[in-house]
């Protein structure tokens, strides 16, 4: 606020974020059954609004406005249809409410990266935007971050971030007094240039994708250069495995902290400050992990992630199958009542398909001789029996080395795939800056219909 230095007087939006933060501080300790009870009450309001004001839901939901409070339970909820990405694409404006509550703020456009091959567009509101900031603040507070410190982001840049990067300027990454700046660098730049920039900036925190972190760690190990002030790496958008966490500890002596989010719904889950599993943000979303029969998975089972945004009254996303797979976990020893995701495994297209029709998660990464200096690799399933292994390396592998890799892939997948080696100068990232070690063109065709 103008002419006021200390203590800080927040503006209207920031005051709401802080008020929400106080509620989140209390609700995180509530018992799971209390969370579910409060979620269902909010969902009753959302369903009534959707059935009344959203054309698509008028066709797919029975009228519920006449029902009193308390009518919704788990059994009834599980009878509601799933919303798939194809439904969102095909519905278009029919999935947008004709009467967004004025108090929720003016609707604005949100576009997904289309990483499943099906980009989608929805609308958010002032409510969903403020909720995003409240969850972001919770994430930083959980992990005890210094709000005055410098943060560097090596990510896909949006317009305002790209403009800041081009000017060599930073943007505040929080709204506290003496807020630290976040500096940006394009993820599509050569990794050696990224690393040189990182050394120059010497931040306290780094935000980047797991695949990019792996390359930065390799360069750091080879050169012996370190970022002196770096205290923590925050990863997003891709799957984090234990070898990467170990490599970060071994090379830089710091932890990797991961989060799970989407453009459409915001924060889904964030890593616990004490344990490696993820806490679902159940004050914002109802997260279901469903087995092939549509029943909730138990801890140890892997299933499809289905999301319901509790507060988006512009484009209600009700039982939205986002295209990810995950594994739920038992309650966290930290004592929070928020549901647990033990592992996030990736997208449908990250499954390998065997000639029998069986699908499972590939065992990666592959191991290569150190002197080959494999800079990047990507394994692509081209058919039921054939794979292509793309390599960016300092030299070609010998026939003996290629045969060793073939045997390794056969052992990992349980089938003697025909492997075609392809040597590249670079393996490009997706349009949104993401990168995958394994993808199946079979499943991409199945998802997109192309």
Image: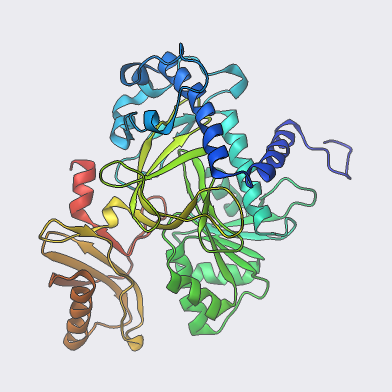
Q: Pick the quarter of the image with the C terminus.
A: top left
Q: In this view, does 376 lie above or below 15?
A: below
Q: In this view, does 12 lie above or below 331?
A: above
> What colouring method underlies this structural image?
rainbow
In the displayed structure image, the side of residue 340 where residue 89 appears, left or right: left
Q: Position of residue 403 (x, y in %)?
A: 17, 83
Nearest to the observer: residue 100 or residue 360 = 360
Residue at position x 75%, y 57% in the image = 148
Decide if residue 33 is in sight here: yes
Q: Which residue lies furthest to the top in this view?
A: 66
Q: Where is residue 416 in the image (x, y as percent from the top left)?
A: 12, 72
Question: How many discs appear?
Answer: 0
Residue at position x 51%, y 23% in the image = 70
Decide if residue 156 is in sight here: no
In the displayed structure image, the side of residue 99 where residue 320 appears, left or right: left
Residue at position x 34%, y 88% in the image = 371
Q: Is residue 213 above or below residue 332?
A: below
Q: In this view, does 263 lie above or below 247?
A: above
In the displayed structure image, the side of residue 47 where residue 321 appears, left or right: left
Residue at position x 44%, y 59% in the image = 188
Nearest to the observer: residue 154 or residue 135 = 135
Q: Pick the quarter of the image with the N terminus.
A: top right
Q: Where is residue 178 in the image (x, y as percent from the top left)?
A: 79, 52
Nearest to the observer: residue 193 or residue 232 = 232
In the displayed structure image, the side of residue 46 where residue 403 appears, left or right: left
Q: Position of residue 312 (x, y in %)?
A: 50, 29
């Amino acid at each position: 606020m103008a002419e006021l230095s200390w203590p800080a007087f927040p503006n209207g939006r920031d005051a709401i974020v802080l008020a929400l933060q106080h509620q989140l501080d209390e609700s995180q300790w509530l018992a799971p059954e209390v969370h579910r009870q409060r979620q269902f009450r909010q969902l009753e309001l959302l369903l009534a609004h959707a059935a009344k004001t959203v054309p698509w839901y008028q066709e797919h939901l029975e009228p519920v406005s006449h029902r009193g409070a308390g009518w919704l339970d788990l059994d009834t909820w599980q009878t509601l249809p799933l919303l798939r990405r194809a439904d969102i694409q095909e519905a278009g404006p029919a999935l947008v409410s004709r009467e967004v509550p004025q108090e929720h703020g003016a609707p604005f456009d949100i576009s997904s990266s289309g990483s499943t091959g099906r980009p989608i567009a929805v609308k958010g509101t002032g409510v969903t935007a403020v909720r995003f900031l409240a969850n972001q603040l919770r994430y930083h507070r959980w992990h005890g971050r210094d709000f005055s410190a410098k943060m560097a982001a090596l990510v896909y840049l949006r317009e305002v971030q790209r403009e800041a990067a081009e000017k060599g300027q930073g943007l505040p990454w929080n709204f506290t007094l003496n807020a630290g700046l976040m500096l940006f660098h394009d993820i599509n730049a050569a990794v050696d240039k990224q690393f040189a920039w990182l050394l120059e900036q010497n931040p306290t925190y780094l935000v980047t994708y797991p695949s990019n972190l792996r390359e930065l760690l390799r360069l750091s190990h080879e050169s012996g250069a370190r970022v002196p002030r770096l205290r923590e790496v925050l990863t997003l958008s891709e799957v984090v495995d234990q070898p990467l966490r170990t490599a970060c500890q071994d090379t830089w002596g710091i932890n990797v902290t991961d989060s799970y989010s989407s453009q459409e719904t915001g924060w889904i889950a964030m890593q616990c400050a004490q344990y490696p599993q993820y806490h679902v943000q159940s004050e914002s979303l109802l997260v279901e992990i469903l087995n092939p029969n549509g029943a909730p998975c138990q801890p140890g089972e892997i299933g499809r992630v289905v999301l319901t945004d509790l507060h988006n009254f512009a484009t209600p996303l009700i039982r939205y199958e986002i295209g990810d797979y995950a594994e739920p976990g038992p309650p966290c020893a930290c004592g929070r009542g928020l549901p647990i995701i033990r592992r996030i495994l990736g997208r449908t297209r990250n499954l390998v398909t065997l000639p029998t029709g069986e699908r499972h998660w590939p065992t990666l990464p592959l191991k290569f001789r150190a002197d080959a200096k494999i800079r990047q690799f990507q394994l692509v399933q081209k058919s039921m029996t054939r794979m292509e292994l793309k390599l960016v390396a300092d030299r070609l592998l010998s026939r003996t080395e290629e045969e060793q890799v073939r045997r390794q892939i056969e052992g990992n997948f349980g089938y003697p795939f025909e492997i075609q080696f392809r040597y590249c100068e670079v393996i490009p990232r997706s349009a949104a800056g993401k990168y995958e070690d394994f993808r199946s063109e079979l499943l991409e065709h199945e998802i997109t219909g192309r």
